[in-house]
Image (cartoon, helix red, strand yellow):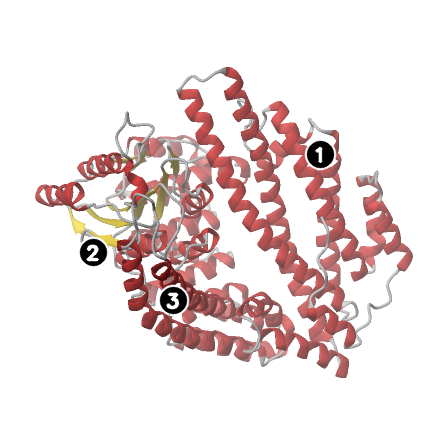
Amino acid sequence: MSREAPGLLPLLFVTAGLALGAVPGDAVDALRSAVSASDARAESVQKALPPVIEAAATAGLPPLSEGIDRFEENFEAGAAEAAKRADRAAPAEGEEPDPAKRLQNIAKGSAEAMRALDLLDVLRKGSLDLVDAVIKKGDPAGVNLVVSEYEKHTRKVDDLEKRDEDGRGKLADLSAKAYELEQSKAKFDAQAKVAGDKAEQAAKVEANAQALEFHRDLRLRLANAAGSMLANAKGPDADRAIAALEKKVDGKAPAEDRIRWIDLYARLGRETIPSEVLDVAQQAARQWKVHEDEANKLRDKYDKAKEAYFKSTDTRTNTVSKATADAFNALQKQMQAATAGQRDMDRLRLAAGRAVGAAVAVVPEGKRDKLVDWALLAAQNEKEIETRCAVVESLGQLDHPKVRESLRKWLVSEKETRVRLEALEALVQLKDAESMEVVRARLLAHENWRVRVAAVAALVRVPQKESIPALIAALEVEVGRVREDVTQALQRMTGQALAMDANVWKRWWDEKGASFKLEDVPKSRRLAVSAWDQAAGGKVTFYGISSISKHVCFVIDISLSMKEADGAANGKSRLDVAKEQMKQAIDGLSDGDTFSIVAFAGSADRWQPKMTKVTAAVKDRAKKWIDNDLDLDMGTNIHAGMKAAFEIAGLGSRDSGYQSEIDTIFFMTDGQPTVGEVTDALELRRLIREWNRLSRIRIHCIGVGKDPNIALLYGIAEDSGGQFQHR
């Protein structure tokens, strides 16, 4: 894989006169030779690393990066080929499902993969150790290389995230094909080919996931290193270098650059930067409103053009007049540009707000206390809710007694639910053990289900033995969706795949609790267990996915392609099957439960404007609407359908998403996103993930037929803890 050319900022650092510094050239040359050799060996690289690390030689970073790129590529290819031959994507019976161990076992089938894996282990550890040595040394010499590496790994993370989404979607598709072939008792050769393809893809996904985790970690460390180096730089050359960075984050720079560089800028250690970073967030919030107003002005014109486009389309030939198509396409581009600008400003607001804590944390100790007080006031008094939440979350990067004390206070006294949950997130980032007592005593029994779900997740992320009996007690009283979360938490903390039954867990704890130790549970076991098998008997079942949720929203595709036959339903159309599935799921709801329905094609239509409480009469009305009012239409506007569901859940309200009862969405489509404010699949996934970050709605996704975007659907389900089904 070729290295990217250095960006503008590193070049400006060079012209600013910051030298590479005195580095042991022979040692770096020896490392470069060891890494670039055609027969490179881990032992040779391991031997060449210590002198470079001891000298904190930044010149050693590029050869390490080049080696990592090369051997990540080699390893993925070799492991994938070995997995395909051996069909070892899944652990053998009784084998721990540890991804790292599984990749090692897969690699054993390929000498090249094994050599690459050994080299990657050495190169990755060496890179992290070298950056830590650079941070410790704090010498500004060589900062241009550090910043160049920061930019490179930022782009690498973006690339790996896209590959991760695509790869997991392909794996989900292959899993569905393997299941279909097994059920239809297809010929052995056909099943074997798909099994091999699935094993190959699984190996690629796991290799990419490990690479992504590493590059995220390295990127953060490089940001810390560059910040500390620049903070110690003195004189006009350093001033010019910092000015170059300032241009990357000022209001004239593209939003993408500002988002990419704000995290590094926040770590320069200057007293003025925390307020500058907050100002960026506040300005972005104001610009967001400008883009929103622009989008609202366009929306009526866009909707009318869209309606004219669909009405004039000849459904037999799927054609429309050029004038109508041109008018619609022009307005759609304007609409998408306006909403894209809005999303850019939202991301900048969040990126800048979430950098405030880090900006204070790197200020020299003697000057930090005053800024800690300032940051706490900013978190307390910021009027714009999104910005305030971002600043509160950022305090998780600022470990100070006053910060911990304030966060614990907000955890129980803050009126805004979202701010309270951000305070909890910050305490989790700080691994604040003391606050977990409050979580167990107060938040596990909170009236708001989202607070209870967040409390459960926090107890898993800051594990304490005392939390296990508290969770068992919660399992005894919880119903619906939260019951699933509590069971999963118990399973992950204990490594026990027990049922969703408090009595079962009580008996186990009575027998094992006294001798149980959290550290005895292997990490791989904590990650492997799941409550989904126990949820299989849930009362609400939709396309084979079961849930015990009592508050459900159905988001259903009614585009024209839904008239096509459902291959698994003996000639019935996809729409007919969807109607049957919805009516069956509604029958599973009990009196007092709540539900809603959103149908979408070119636009979205709601059965009711808000969640409706279940009665026998309400069920009948919903079924009549399903039978009589779901008319097929042009277009597949996934953005509109999902946005309508999240608006029912409170999206856009001041305390966004926390008063609605929706805790589970069933989302079904048979197509790609073709129209709407957002049609890019990766952008849609990111947007839905951000909507749902604190809403914590579980989204189960169903793809029907050959055309849905499997990567998108699988990704939405994975991001939310839901399940994916393809038929």
Q: Mark 3 points at which residue?
A: 410
Residue 558, placed above or below residue 649: above
Percent x, y of residue 369: 55, 77
Labelled disc at residue 711? none
How many discs mark residues in the rendered view? Answer: 3
Percent x, y of residue 43: 82, 40
Q: Name the residue under label 1.
A: 113
Mark 3 or mark 2, which is nearer the start of the sequence?
3
Q: Is residue 671 left or right of residue 594?
A: right
Residue positioned most to the bottom: 236
Residue beneath the point at 76% across and 83% down = 236
- What amino acid type should be assigned to the residue bearing mark 1? Ala
Q: Which of 367 and 111 is in front in this view?
A: 111
Discs 2, 1 touching: Cβ within 8 Å = no
Quarter occupied by the C terminus: top left
Residue positioned most to the right: 26
Q: Name the residue under label 2.
A: 610
Dot 2 crowding, Cα within 10 Å, few <14, some 14–19, many 20+: many
